[in-house]
Amino acid sequence: MHDANELTSAEEDDYYSGGDDDIDYGDAQEDYNYEYGYGNDDDDDDDDDNGDYDFMHNDSDADEVSASRAQKNYTVLKEEDIRKIQGEDIMRISNVLSISREAACILLRRYNWNVNDVHEQWFADEGRVRKSVGLFEKPVVQFLNAKEVTCGICFDNYSHELVHSAACGHAFCDSCWKAYVSTSINDGPGCLTLRCPSPSCGAAIGQDMIDMLASDEDKEKYRHYLLRSFVEDSRKTKWCPAPGCDYAIKYVVGSGNYDVTCSCSYSFCWNCTEEAHRPVDCETVAKWILKNSAESENMNWILANSKPCPKCKRPIEKNQGCMHMTCTPPCKFEFCWLCLGAWIDHGERTGGFYACNRYESAKQEGVYDDTEKRREMAKNSLERYTHYYERWASNQLSRQKALADLQQMQSVHLEKLSKVQSQPKSQMKFIIEAWQQIVECRRVLKWTYAYGYYLPEYEPTKQQFFEYLQGEAETGLERLHQCAEKELQNYLNAEGQSKDFNDFRTKLAGLTSVTRNYFENLVRALENGLSDVDSQGASSKATSSIAGSSKGKGGRGM
Amino acid sequence: MTSCSSSARKASLSKIASNRLQKELMEWQVNPPVGFKHKVTDNLQRWVIEVNGAPGTLYAGETYQLQVDFPEHYPMEAPQVIFIPPAPLHPHIYSNGHICLDILYDSWSPAMTVSSICISILSMLSSSPEKQRPADNDRYVKNCRNGRSPKETRWWFHDDKA
Ligand SMILES: [Zn+2]
Ligand SMILES: [Zn+2]
Ligand SMILES: [Zn+2]
Ligand SMILES: [Zn+2]
Ligand SMILES: [Zn+2]
Ligand SMILES: [Zn+2]
């Protein structure tokens, strides 16, 4: 028994060979940022000869870096993989317990595909386990020497060769068995625990009987239920919740970080299966989603995609990802989508030139509206919620837009850019990386607004520090987004090769790297509950610990 | 077909179903379950069965009527079994005649028969310690007002064997 258990866990550890990579991960990442931060435009042109930068720009290595970024505490499984693992588990139980594969399958299903549980239960009390799943060792009824047997369903008589029975010996004719099996399979996944039709017999009907009695179509359904059961009943696996995706994720239970990214590119939280939501915890996400649905009627107006221009009052539509809006000519008023304030005012006061996060200060200064009535409403909790919700939803929209832009970039623009700038497409990877980073940052930023909403109001130092960090993050991201969205246009629409294209590359790659670094530190700091902040406003110390790596290594402060 | 009764909206019995019912009917005539009387009609798809409360139980001397409707794919599918009101006062029998008994729904097996159903129902009646309606009777009956079949109910069965 002990051998069996050890065998299993050893093999399972083996399966997740990423286990001790966690230790190296931090270092590798530091190196990564370091190298990238100092990247110069020359190394892109001849990356084959440049040893130092090689690992950054070589496709497969870059993939490895991004995989180790995910800490490898999960595996994405295709249908073949699932079947393979399932088959291996069944084989293992069949061998160790010396029972048929069908019986092993029934046992595994009973114990939610947990190999260890099957071993433990079986060796603790084989008789009880057999009884509970209906695995009979010998028939409970014997055929008498009568010539014919009566089918227990249609009550017609048949000769012995024409009836079948499970291990119990209860005989039913071929067509009754077929109808029984077919009815059960078409009733749903309950067919996986099918028992002998004889009342209170309970003998299990295994896959061997199904294979003998079911139509090809029903056999396929049965196999599908078996596959689903393997994923859905096991504590270690879940389907990817993205619509139309057939992959499953196998997760190392108890390994911390819940964010997983499926091969279909959808990122979700393994624990609650909501969309990935680091740095916010699952309970907060659940609360926030509930809150949103409760407030959804009030919030409908917010989601509307058009607002009047604050200057000329013509309705304008937001169709770009960043918050910096420019009204159509002749007005050309530049303003902020979030607060509708002039863009020119967005500087130190709003938490950075590109940022607009300072709800508290805006509220105090009455930027939203200068009437007394409005000022009173600012005290209202809905107003507070609205502030966070609007920014949460805006980032969500921006993220979707960025995702679409990323796809557009990959499918159309890259080709064009490579032609216009007469550089190979392989040299344009920095643009894709920038957009991937934008998508990820929009996701994080979005969730920081749920985080901010639930920050306790009695901890003003934390709140201030949080808003400062969020503002920095927003500034960095807006700058990156602006660069990848608007500055890129110049090179995309250029007549021919631009002299400063390589400078653009350096700038965008640098911004990507610095932003990535900043956001990773931000996520960690928020997940730690901003524990660096003590009650006496020691935010400067904490600030340096967060911003430190990006400034020190990348040489570009945000 | 000729009748406009409630059975007209149901598909008629498959050949397998009517063969099997003929056999059950024959067996019933030879060997009826104690306490039950089948009022034979020419309608094989609906049986009306008289139930007599077992002597020495709360229902002794009382008579009720069971209505058994067979689906097209009987016995693969369970028959619909209800008491024709007035239904006996019992913690698992609703005033509209619906019966909370697992073998009529999830635990049905094609190897069961009308006769075995009758025996189960009688044993359910006989073992009752008190004559009363289920606690959720009014709510349930209200929900069934549009002639809903008990087979459409998601039952969860009490394990108390009352
Ligand atoms: Zn048969
Ligand atoms: Zn049996
Ligand atoms: Zn997926
Ligand atoms: Zn979660
Ligand atoms: Zn305007
Ligand atoms: Zn603003």
Image (cartoon, coloured by chain):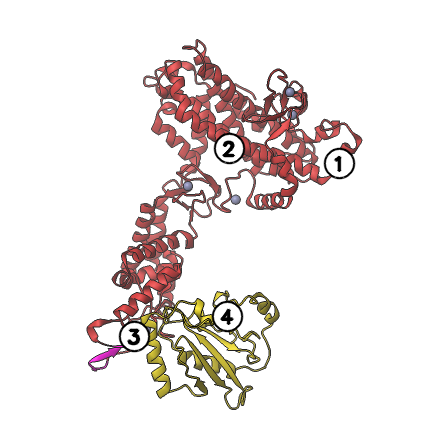
CA separation in Å, label 2 and label 4: 48 Å
Q: Which chain is red?
A: A
* Residue at the spot of label 3: A170
* Residue at the spot of label 1: A377
The three-letter code of the residue at mark 1 reads Met
Taking the image as shown, residue B150 lies to the left or right of residue B44, namely right
* Residue at the spot of label 4: B157
CA separation in Å, label 4 and label 3: 27 Å
Q: Looking at the image, do the residues carrying marks 1 and 4 touch, with CB atoms under 8 Å apart? A: no
Q: Earlier in the sequence, mark 1 or mark 2?
A: 1
CA separation in Å, label 3 and label 2: 60 Å
Tell me where residue A390 sits by quadrant: top right
In the depicted structure, whether residue A3 falls above or below residue A259: below
Look at chain B in the picture and name its colour. yellow
Taking the image as shown, residue B136 lies to the left or right of residue A176, namely right
Q: Which residues are magenta?
A: A144-157
| Viewer-nearest residue: A92 or A491 | A491
Dot 4 alpha-carbon crowd within 10 angstroms: few under 14, some 14 to 19, many 20 or more:
few
